[in-house]
Image: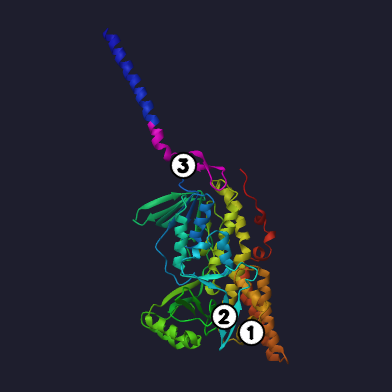
Amino acid sequence: MVDQGILGWIFASLLGFVVFRSVLLKNKKKDGASVEIRDECVKSTANGECRSKTAYEEADVIIVGAGVAGAALANTLGKDGRRVRVIERDLTEPDRIVGELLQPGGYLKLIELGLQDCVEEIDAQRVFGYALFKDGKNTKLSYPLEKFDSDVAGRSFHNGRFIQRMREKAATLPNVQLEQGTVTSLLEEKGTIRGVNYKTKDGETMTAYAPLTIVCDGCFSNLRRSLCTPKVDVPSCFVGLLLEDCELPFANHGHVVLADPSPILFYRISSTEIRCLVDVPGQKVPSISNGEMAKYLKAVVAPQIPPELYDGFIAAINKGNIRTMPNRSMPAAPHPTPGALLMGDAFNMRHPLTGGGMTVALSDIVVLRDLLRPLHDLNDAATLCKYLESFYTLRKPVASTINTLAGALYKVFCASPDQARKEMRDACFDYLSLGGVCSSGPVSLLSGLNPRPLSLVCHFFAVAIFGVGRLLLPFPSPKRVWIGARIISGASGIIFPIIKAEGVRQMFFPATVPAYYRAPPVK
């Protein structure tokens, strides 16, 4: 009896243990479901198709930075049904002196992305063209907008207001998460980017995962080195002032003064404020703190600006709110990396003289959106990377035209003691003053309405030939012939290095690049 009782007790104990263990394991599986790597079908609101989801990945796409490029991209991918996580260093309204002019071509891209309402309710001003000033003469250059709706024009505004509108719009999408934090590094595993390491605003170190990480952290990017070969040039600096309660000589136009030593820009950014940007060649500018900058602006710059703006210019200097910003240019030289992509100023920069940066960024987003739309699954990083190589070719018509024009125009517009450069500068002003195709052609290139690199090269050398022709008529002399030859040589020395950096084949013959025809991966 005792033996049977002991055996019964042992049997009951074992049975209880087995039952307890099975219950425990069942609960553990439930609790651990959020950290296990498992695949499940998730419906996309964009196309209703199923895509695989890795449970530890919190998003389809991580976007680093919520400036113009990052915020616009978050809206675009979010509306396409992607789960987007945006990590931005500072979510308060930015206060910058650049990124305040959107060309008409950029506004058309904004419409294409469904973001045109982001320039509403921020006191944005319409821009219909440019006015050029040189040696007391002026000429007005209008955008060729006849074929477009009446709403299509350039827009100028406070950069921070525009960005905040796009951030607010992105935040209304249920699948877009905006978070304040500083990304410290990309998370790499066997050559593939799996996500990012970042610090929250409270200083806590965190890790975020996604199949695709898009870096849009601006001109001062600390992440671009692993994704491209950055060759950053700083040809000059902008000195920014804000003029109040004064009028531009030509309403609703940007104003460019061909001053000595380099151009001065004026454009309205609100109903009561005009932005002035004084270009100072080189990387060093007069000190603001000891008053040298104020003296320079009053003695060198003020005598060269239109008289209608003189009093407002002096008042802005006396007010003391003088700011500086280095002007950077950097050709796109990407290293295609599985799991990651560069966008915006982190990827490609040009001199801001022509105000083309936002147009290039928005155009790039349209290209990327169209490439990603057919894809239901972003988890095959190697295949995705191969497919997205076409992005670098498809973006070239718009990007290379605006980049090349910005670099070439800046060099032509700067004053020089060289006689050939002086003649080229004069020829450029007079060529644009001719009107007709001589003004509408270059302006359509600058505005992003006609992104054709070949047209750009034709107009650039037309200016040079126009300058040579003026020299040789009515009677050529050996000295004039020599200067004419140097004009052609100088023009070639300006534009060809820029074209080389952009990539001759991608710029002029994109259809010969194999990636141009790359089809979406089939799964």
Magenta range: 27-55
Label 1: which residue? 430
The answer to which of marks 3 and 1 sits earlier in the sequence is 3
- Along the line of sight, the residue nearer the viewer: 187 or 341: 341
Is residue 352 visible in this depiction of the protein? yes
Q: Is residue 104 above or below residue 194?
A: below
Which of discs 3 and 1 lies nearer the camera? The answer is: 1
Residue hosting label 3: 55
Is residue 65 something that shows in the picture?
no
Q: Nearer the viewer, mark 1 or mark 2?
A: 2
Q: Secondary structure at mark 1?
A: helix
Residue 443 highlighted magenta (yes or no): no
- Packing grade of label 3 (10 A; few <14, some 14-19, many >=20) is some
Local packing at callout 2 (Cα closer than 10 Å; few below 14, some 14-19, many 20+) is many
| Nearest to N terminus: mark 2 or mark 3 | 3
Camera-side mark, 2 or 3: 2
Label 3, label 1: how far apart the Cα atoms are: 64 Å
Return the residue at label 2.
131
Towards the viewer: 175 or 209: 175
Quarter containing the C terminus? top right
In this view, which residue lies farthest toward the left? 2
In the drawing, does residue 321 fall left or right of residue 464? left
Distance from Cα at disc 2 to Cα at disc 3: 57 Å
Under mark 2, the amino acid is: Ala
* In magenta segment, residue 42: yes
Q: CA separation, marks 1 and 2?
A: 13 Å
